[in-house]
Image (tube, helix red, strand yellow):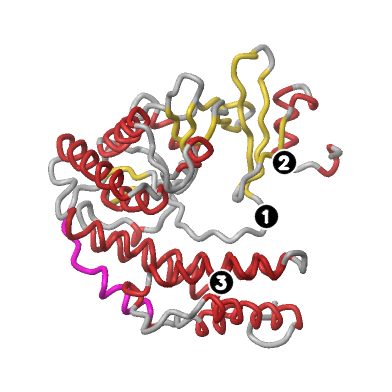
């Protein structure tokens, strides 16, 4: 890549490293274009510079103005997070050397107890970061900041974000496909009714995206937590629900994680696990419903990628969305879940409409 056509992230990486050949990247990643490099005179550490990829759909609310500012404020309060340096007015994150937890222990497999304990420690440290002690600029609107303890209000704002910024924002292009799958505006009324009645819990800092690819295990078996971009202030039980949904623990280990989480957060912030048995299933149901809207759009767009291996991709897409819809049938009040073949047919109709330039699905 010539520097004339390089992105701002690459140009800055070359500038601060002083050696274009030492810049590695762009690294694989959905949301960002990332480059890794060493700073002059510092061969012991590598740093990363990144910028958001153009034209991406964002399906999650972002509450802090800067991930790097947040990480700087958490130094000494949360262990195992990247260091931050500022060069020429731009903050850089230290690149954590190691392997993702997911590459070591794939989804659905158990996590070793030594690493599980470190995950529990992260939750314990998060619950101690209260809103009044977190002096970092936030970008979310006032209505997205319910009073501490208002777990119902917190979840309502998440449901509203999914409705407004995922479903309605993309409705013109995907309305027919959603309807073919049994999803419409009434789905949100049913979802709100299904998840109402949460207990009050004291709010704290949430990572909100704690999954196997956001944990790095270094050579000393130390766990690092990366990608804090979706962090927010809110109901701590939501962070646990998101973690369980994304991690796909075996059932027996999931129960262990819930017990460990409850013991740790309750000792540090009494009331943080209030209503766990009733509310955790409801928060998990929200995550299942949220996945319907995000996965339908992502899967549909992936079918537009070209004709190569289309039939194989279509088969897998039908199976995937069938599982996602089946999991969310209760929360969304679906009377029936289409077969994988029916879903594949709906995706094909949407793709043809999109490619022909006719109908709702056309761009």
The quadrant of the image that shows the C terminus is: bottom right
Residue 335 versus residue 50 in the image, above or below: below
Q: Which of 333 and 166 is in front in this view?
A: 333
* Residues rendered magenta in the picture: 187-200
Residue 213 versus residue 141 in the image, above or below: above
- Residue 339: image x %, image y %? 50, 79
- Residue 129 lies in magenta, yes or no? no
- Residue 249: image x %, image y %? 37, 47
Q: Nearer the viewer, residue 217 or 165?
A: 217
The quarter holding residue 155 reads bottom left
The quarter holding residue 279 reads bottom left
The structure residue drawn at horizontal position 44% and vertical position 23%, both measured from the top left corner, is 221
The residue tagged 3 is 318
Q: How crowded is mark 3: few (under 14 residues within 10 Å), some or many (20 or more)?
A: many
Q: Which residue lies furthest to the top in this view?
A: 41
Q: How crowded is mark 2: few (under 14 residues within 10 Å), some or many (20 or more)?
A: some
- Residue 207: image x %, image y %? 39, 44
The residue tagged 1 is 54
Marker disc for residue 8: 2
């Amino acid at each position: 890549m010539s520097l004339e056509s390089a992105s701002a992230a690459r140009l800055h990486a070359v500038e601060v490293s002083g050696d274009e050949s030492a810049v590695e990247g762009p690294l694989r990643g959905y949301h960002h274009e990332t480059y890794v490099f060493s700073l002059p005179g510092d061969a012991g550490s590598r740093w990363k510079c990144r910028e958001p990829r153009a034209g991406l759909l964002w399906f999650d609310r972002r509450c802090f103005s800067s991930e790097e500012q947040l990480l700087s404020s958490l130094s000494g309060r949360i262990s195992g997070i990247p260091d931050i340096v500022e060069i020429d007015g731009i903050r850089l994150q230290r690149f954590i050397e190691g392997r993702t937890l997911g590459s070591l222990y794939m989804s659905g497999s158990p996590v070793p107890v030594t690493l599980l304990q470190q995950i529990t420690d992260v939750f314990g440290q998060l619950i101690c970061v209260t809103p009044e002690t977190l002096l970092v600029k936030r970008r979310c609107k006032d209505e997205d900041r319910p009073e501490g303890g208002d777990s119902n209000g917190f979840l309502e704002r998440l449901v509203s974000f999914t409705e407004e910024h995922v479903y309605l924002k993309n409705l013109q292009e995907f309305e027919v496909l959603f309807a073919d799958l049994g999803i419409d505006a009434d789905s949100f009324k049913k979802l709100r009714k299904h998840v109402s009645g949460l207990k009050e819990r004291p709010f704290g800092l949430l990572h909100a995206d704690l999954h196997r690819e956001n944990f790095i295990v270094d050579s000393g078996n130390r766990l690092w937590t990366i990608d804090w971009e979706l962090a927010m202030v809110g109901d701590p039980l939501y962070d646990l629900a998101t973690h369980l949904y994304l991690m796909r623990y075996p059932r027996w280990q999931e129960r262990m994680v819930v017990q460990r989480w409850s013991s740790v957060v309750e000792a540090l912030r009494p009331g943080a696990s209030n209503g766990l048995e009733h509310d955790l299933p409801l928060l998990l149901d929200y995550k299942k419903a949220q996945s319907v809207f995000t996965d339908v759009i992502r899967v549909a767009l992936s079918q537009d990628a070209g004709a190569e291996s289309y039939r194989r991709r279509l088969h897998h897409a039908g199976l995937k969305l069938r599982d996602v819809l089946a999991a969310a049938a209760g929360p969304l009040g679906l009377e029936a879940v289409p077969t994988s073949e029916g879903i594949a047919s709906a995706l094909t109709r949407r793709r043809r409409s999109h490619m022909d330039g006719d109908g709702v699905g056309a761009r």
